[in-house]
């Protein structure tokens, strides 16, 4: 089938979600989507490589609601006749949504787009992200960052007081480990776990874990090196 397909579902929003940020995440869709809540159009999305995410704050209040999703696998962009992403000969023209499909509720102040950038030999870790503050006023909090090795041992801890302005604001933190770190490569893919914990006073507001690898990629004499070794 080429063209739009329609999906509907009734959801019950608990009272505990009142005042929270609510999002719908659809991990993989083919190709464009549009979402209605109780007959009101929320928006549209059209990515083939990233989740379709809808902000439903204000739409999903406590109670019963009806979600209506239209997914259209018609060619949105001309990818050419040799595309592997949209070609009938290799069964890539499907229709629907697969992967993680979920509703999520976060507090009025929450983190988003948390990213990590590492430097192996320098033993540094740069953590960036955004604070979304729907409280309508300035809010203070604490961001706790903990890096654990594959055995669960904490090798780095950092505590940062943060000020979340109304709306959105960014954070950008540079951390350094006191000890040498295990490098990542394709033969020994050693990973650490970085945990970002947002605190509202003594209350844990949100926890985001990230898998992190440390490596150094460079080019010397026209040769690509990973951690000093030729690829």
Image: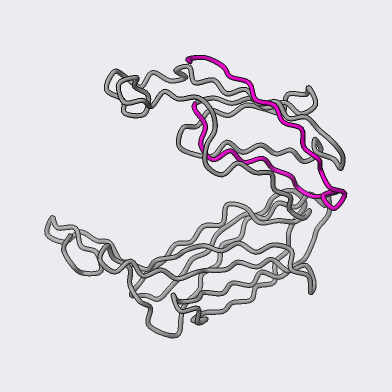
SS assignment for the magenta stretch, majority: strand
185 up-or-down from 24: above or below: below
Counting from the top left corner in percent of width and height, residue 193 is at 49, 69
- Residue 1 drawn at (x, y percent): 48, 15
Foreground residue among 91 and 137: 91
Give the farthest residue toward the left: 221
Look at 56% across and 74% down and name the residue there: 146
Left or right of 158 on screen, residue 124:
left
Q: Position of residue 31 (x, y in %)?
A: 50, 26
Q: Quadrant of residue 150?
A: bottom left
Choose top left, top right, bottom left or bottom right for residue 131.
bottom right
- Horizontally, is 174 left or right of 231 in the view? right
Q: Is residue 214 left or right of residue 45?
A: left
| Figure quadrant of residue 159 | bottom right
In this view, the residue farthest toward the bottom is 179
Based on the picture, tell me whether residue 193 belongs to the magenta stretch: no
At x 50%, y 39%, the residue is: 50
Looking at the rendering, the stretch of residues picked out in magenta corresponds to 1-30
Q: How is the image coloured?
A: one colour
Give above or below for 219 relative to 27.
below
* Residue for point 45% across, 76% down: 149
x and y, in percent, of residue 154 in the image? 52, 81
Q: 143 or 162: which is nearer to us?
A: 143
* Magenta run includes residue 13: yes
Position above or below: 111 against 13: below
Quadrant in which the C terminus appears: bottom left
Q: Residue at x 18, y 67 (%)?
A: 229
In the picture, measured across the screen, residue 191 lies left or right of residue 168, that is left
How many dots with numbers?
0
């Amino acid at each position: 089938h080429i063209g739009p397909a329609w999906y509907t579902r009734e959801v019950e929003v608990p009272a505990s979600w009142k005042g929270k940020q609510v999002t719908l995440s659809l991990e993989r869709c083919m190709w464009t989507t549009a979402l209605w809540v109780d007959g009101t159009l929320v928006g549209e999305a059209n990515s083939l490589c990233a989740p379709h995410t809808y902000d439903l704050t204000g739409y999903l209040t406590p109670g019963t609601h009806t979600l209506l999703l239209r997914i259209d696998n018609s060619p949105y962009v001309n990818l050419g006749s040799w595309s592997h992403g949209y070609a009938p000969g290799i069964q890539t023209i499907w229709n629907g949504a697969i992967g993680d499909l979920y509703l999520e509720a976060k507090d009025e102040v929450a983190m988003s787009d948390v990213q990590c950038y590492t430097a192996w030999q320098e033993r540094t870790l740069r953590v960036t992200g955004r604070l979304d503050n729907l409280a309508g006023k300035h809010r203070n909090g604490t961001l706790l960052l903990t890096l654990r090795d594959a055995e669960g041992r904490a090798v780095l801890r950092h505590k940062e007081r943060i000020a979340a302005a109304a709306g959105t604001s960014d954070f950008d933190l540079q951390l350094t480990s006191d000890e040498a770190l295990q490098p990542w490569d394709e033969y020994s893919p050693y990973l650490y776990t970085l945990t970002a914990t947002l605190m509202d006073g003594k209350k844990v507001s949100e926890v985001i874990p990230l898998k992190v690898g440390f490596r150094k990629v460079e080019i010397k004499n026209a040769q690509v090196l990973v951690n000093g070794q030729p690829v």
